[in-house]
Structure formats: structure tokens, C-alpha cells
Image (spheres, rainbow, N blue to C red):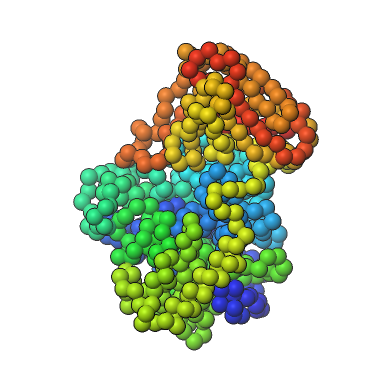
Amino acid sequence: MRTVLRCLACFCVVVACVSTSAAPPNVLVILTDDQGWGDLSFNGNTNLATPNIDALAKAGASFDRFFVQPVCSPTRAEFLTGRYHPRGGVWDVSTGGERLNLDERTIADVFRGAGYATGCFGKWHNGTQYPFHPRGRGFDEYYGFTSGHWGDYFSPPLDHNGKMVTGNGFIVDDLTDRAIAFIGENAAKKRPFLCYLPIPTPHTPAQVPDAFFKKFDGAELKLRGPRTENVAKTRAVLAMCENIDHNVGRVLAKLDALKIAGETIVVYFHDNGPNGPRWNGGMRGVKGSTEEGGVRSPLFIRWPGHVRPGSRIAPIAGAIDLLPTLADLAGIPLAGGKARDGVSLGPLLAAGDPTAAVMSGKAWPDRVIVNHWNGKVSARSQTHRLDATGKLYDMVADPGQTTDVAAKEPAVAARLTAAVDAYRRDVLGALKRGGQDDRPLPVGHAAFPVTQLPARDGVGHGGVRRSASAPNCSFFTNFGGGKDDRITWDVEVATAGKYQAVVYYTCPAADVGATVELSVGPAVVRTKVAEAHDPPLRGQENDRFKRESESYVKDFKPLAVGTLELKAGRATVTLRGVDVPGKSVMDVRMVTLTLVP
């Protein structure tokens, strides 16, 4: 059986091999957060050992040059859709800009439509409010956090299918437990599954159990990055990477124990370059950069009996290729829907050769893959990279990007410049720019009655401030009784009816007594802050070095504000203090609006 896919990047048609077996394969996708290409012993880092990931790579195919985007949510959106992230409305990593447009069809939609059980366990980072939530994007089961980063990795507050729960121990171990349970349940039912395990580490805060950190505590590094390397951070990151490897080994062992390893496609990759300067194979760039080191990720694909062990794939590929590849391998048609930028890598996997020389020229087109973040655009062909300033580098002869060869190779420079111009025109052209996003936060879907409005998605006015510069896991503080002090959320009420409003707050005893007012359009409710709740900040006790931008956290208490009668349509949610006797009304982590049946 063959399927034809069109590559938008190079305007070529490729023919891909698909599964013809009676039983569709299971799919396990493991994505790590802020782990650089060089953070694996498979890629030559002698500072750490990642034997389980290395074994996965050796048992299947490893792609030599696989490209993601410079930061988290864009890469996740491209994996989910097979399309460049701006096409799906993803332009930021927080405050709503990370949301994937609702008219995008995700990999979970595709596989669930083919009869698969679908589960996601970890960091989502493409929208919180339903139907941006994973449960609205094709996943039957979700456990994790939907934000861009979290403030504490030990028994943190998490989201289980829209309900707030408390995690169980170290977050990566906990998420892996949930993924293993999901795999076991569906294997017992003999139902094919798509299990997506987006592990949130080694993104900071730098927290990891003692059993993994003790090896690196004070250890001398065998390989060093640039002079700006924070060695304390690197030690913590390497320990977190060994914990990841341990958990990857646990999932793979579960496949073996269930005797379904041969029926399961396993994919492993990272979401961007390293979150700081450290050893990364001599490449230029880190997370946030469109240079090679900021966007190169490992990609390992194992499928026993279908992908030759030890295959080294030379042609370039990207996160945009994963949806079409996995659908192709599973024999799921992708007819209709929006055009995808990615192509199936099935022919490369079928022809994989340990010599790493297969299909590097004549049989596979020389594609152009584009990397973009924050207005900077870089284009990569099989042999060259045009950086965001227009400099051209021969990546074969000069992988560290030291010498601009644009003047020597004008035809190559012109080709890649044209690709950048086309991307700016066709992909970025319709994207909201300048920090503006006119998409309101959806509230009140009957299928998902509880809507969370976290501080991350709100706007503080007057003297109200965030607890940290990075919004993702922040809370609002300095919320006083000034005439301009208020917090707002731009929402769209989907269902008219009654809604219970709850504010998650903390308040010291000295400030008890303020009246808090919550309005949604013309509907208003008030209640008094009658009980002190002033827990300490936490998180620092688990940090392995001083955190850079994430907020410390504390335990917030629910305060029932009242019931509102809301009309369908767009409105502003406003939280303000009235009759404030102390210095502050409260600190605010979140407001929830629950549709009453």
C-alpha cells in the first residue's frame, strides 16, 4: 500500500510505505523539555550516562539532523499538527499566545478517529481552557499541567481531565507511572493506543531526587560549554537527564513485560536546544536561538521488524514531519483538512542504512526547513543554513557556523533567502504581532463545565504585580484597594446560565476583612475575605541552584465568591477589592467559573 504526500517546503511529491498488517501499531511519543542535542551519552556527552535512551536509538533509526523550533510551545504545535506553528496561531509561550487554534486537527484527533485510545501525560503548553485543553484536542485521558513551566516538581498541583489534583512525588516519575498505567490498560483491552509523554524536565526549576543528584553534586565536568556556562545549573540538568533516562527505561520495560514492544512505534525527541550554555557538540546557539544549536534535536524511532536497528538517517527532517510519518506508518489516511508542511519519513525509515549515507542526495529531495522565533527566521537545507541576519554557513564544512559564505555561494544564499521570504509572506503574514491576541478565553462548555482562569492568562492593573517575571506559574500580588487595582481576563461565554465563581487566594491575618468583587460583564457578586490563609512560599527547598525566572509557589485556598447569571458572548472578568482595611486584598492564583447544570 502506498500513500502520496506533498512537501510544501520543497514542492515535491514523495511516496511513503505504510503498515499493511491487520493489527495497527501502538505509538509512544516521548518529548523532553529544554534538553539539548548534546545532553545524551549517545551523542558523545561523557558527563552523563543515558543507557536506556542510547539503547532505544541503537535499536531503531536515529536522524542526524532533525530540527524543532527554538522554544517549547511552537515545537509542540508543529508535532501536533504537522504544520508550521504560526499557521496554528502559536506566537508566544504564555498569556494566551501559546494556544493552538481550534480549527487545527491534531495527531490525537487523527489517531482517535482511527479507533486508537489517546492519552497525554505531562506538559501540554498549547492552551488551558477547553476546548484548547488536551481533552478538547483529541486526547481521551490527560494528566499533567497545561502551562509552559511549573514552580515545583515534587507533589505539585496538577490537572487530571480538567480537575485539580495533587501529584504523587517527583513529577517525572509520577507522569511515567500514569503513562505506564494507560499503556497497560489498553494493552489488556487489545486496543491500539497513542501515548504522548511530554516530560517537563530538564526545564527549570532545577529539581531532581537525591538519588540522581548525588552523582553530580560538586562533580568536575569532563566536557565544558562556553565560558558563560553555569556549572551548577549544568550539574542539575545532567542529573535531571539521567532521571529522564531512568523513566524512559521504565516505559520501555513495560512494553517488554506486556510483550507489545514489537507492536509499538516509539519516538523520542526534544522540544528545543539546551536551556543555557553547556556542551552541545560545538554548535552555535541555545534555547531561544534559531542557530543550529538552538533547534537541533535528536530523533529516534524504533519499531522492531519494520525499522532496521542501527539506521542512521542523513536527510534533514523536522517536527512538522512527525504527524504525517506516524499516520503513514500506522496506515491512517490523512486525506482532507489543512495542507501540512511536513512529509512522511516512511521511505527513509524503510531504506535505513547504518552507513548514514542512504538517500542523502538523488533519491530524496533537498528540502528547506524553516526555524522561527520572535521575528527571527532561519532556513536550513541539507548542507547550508541561512541565519536570521542573512549570513550563510556551509554546515558540512563549518558546523560551528564561523564563516559566512554568502558571497562565495550566491545561488545557495538566494535559494534560502527566497524560502525565508516565502515563510514571512505565507506563514507569518496573517499572524498577530506585537503582543496582541484577540482570541478570548473560552468559558462554559457543557462538556467541560469547570473553566480555570489562571493568573498567567490575566492582566494586572494599577499596582497589581506578578510574583515573577515569567507569567506561566505566577500569581498576582500587591493587589491593594487603589482605584485602578484590578485583575482582568478577556473571555467568551459559550453557554448562558448560572456559574459558580471561586477565587484561589492567600491573605495574611493583618489584611483579613476586604470585600472582593467579581464581575463578568454586567453580572456582579461580592464576598468578604473572612479567613486568613498565609502559607509560606515553597520550592526553594528542592532547588539544586538558585532559580532564574520561575515563581516560587504556595498553597492557595478556594474562596467561594457567589453565583452569577451569565449571557453567552464576549465579556471581561474583573476582580477588584472593595472596602480594603489592610495593605492588600489578597494574592490570587486563579479564578474558576463552573457552569451549574
Residue 279 is left or right of residue 169, and the answer is left
Question: Is residue 401 placed above or below 268 in the rendered structure?
Answer: below
Q: Nearer the viewer, residue 156 or 309?
A: 156
Residue 211 in the image, given as x and y percentages of width and height: 33, 43
Residue 75 in the image, given as x and y percentages of width and height: 51, 58
Q: Residue furthest front?
A: 483
- Give the quarter of the figure containing the C terminus: top right
Residue 525, quarter of the rendered image: top right
Question: Is residue 185 placed above or below 524 in the rendered structure?
Answer: below
Residue at (33% x, 70% y) in the render: 401
Residue 174 is left or right of residue 498, and the answer is left
- Give the quarter of the figure containing the N terminus: bottom right
Residue 396, quarter of the rendered image: bottom left
Q: Is residue 59 visible?
A: no
Residue at (58% x, 31% y) in the render: 487
Residue 454 in the image, given as x and y percentages of width and height: 57, 36
Residue at (27% x, 45% y) in the render: 232
Q: Nearer the viewer, residue 392 or 351?
A: 392
